[in-house]
Image (cartoon, helix red, strand yellow):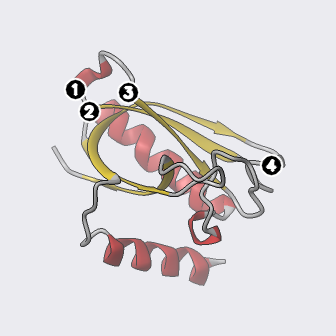
Amino acid sequence: MKKRILASLLVASVFTLTVTSSNALDYVCRTQFNPGSSNLGSEGWLKVYYSTNPNCAVATTILNYCTDGATHAHCAANGFYHYSLDGVLMLWNVLSRAGVENSRVWVKKTTCNDGNLNCGAYVQVYAN
């Protein structure tokens, strides 16, 4: 389990060097972890509300971060971006803290199961 989380973090840090149109700088408005098994993953899923405005005047983007086994239309099509329970809980903790501190985040999006390019892949948080 630890190796998988570490490998995911290392790969994510390598991929953050490539910027495409599917990425954005935003602020975290709200995070919501949903435990339990569903078509959004076998170990729960995380929903994150982002805004381009500091202090989240209006949430402009809502992304799901799904766990292993996800088949929902709004989950990443590539199983590589499906998190373990430990991984999604770590992401929840980091993004919740970024929201409290009003830190800027770089959001990487990926293709969803429904073909849209609007699913969460990973996030990089910038210190204030």
Left-right relation of 38 to 7: right
Where disc 4 sits, the SS reads loop
Q: Which amino acid does label 1 sit on?
A: Pro
Local SS, label 1: helix
Mark 4–mark 3 CB contact (< 8 Å) = no
Q: Which residue is drawn at 73% across and 48% down?
A: 72
- Density class for disc 3 (Cα within 10 Å; few <14, some 14-19, many ≥20) is some
The residues tagged by marks 4 and 1 sit, at their Cα atoms, a distance apart of: 33 Å
- C-beta proximity under 8 Å, tags 4 and 2: no
Tag in front: 2 or 3: 3
Up the image or down, 121 lies above or below 101; here it is below
Between disc 2 and disc 3, whose residue precedes?
3
Mark 1 sits on what residue?
Answer: 54
Instruction: Find out whether the residues at labels 2 and 1 contact each other: C-beta distance under 8 Å.
Output: yes
Residue that extends furthest to the front in the rendered view of this protein: 115
Residue 48 relative to residue 106: left or right:
right
The residue located at (52%, 56%) in the rendering is 90
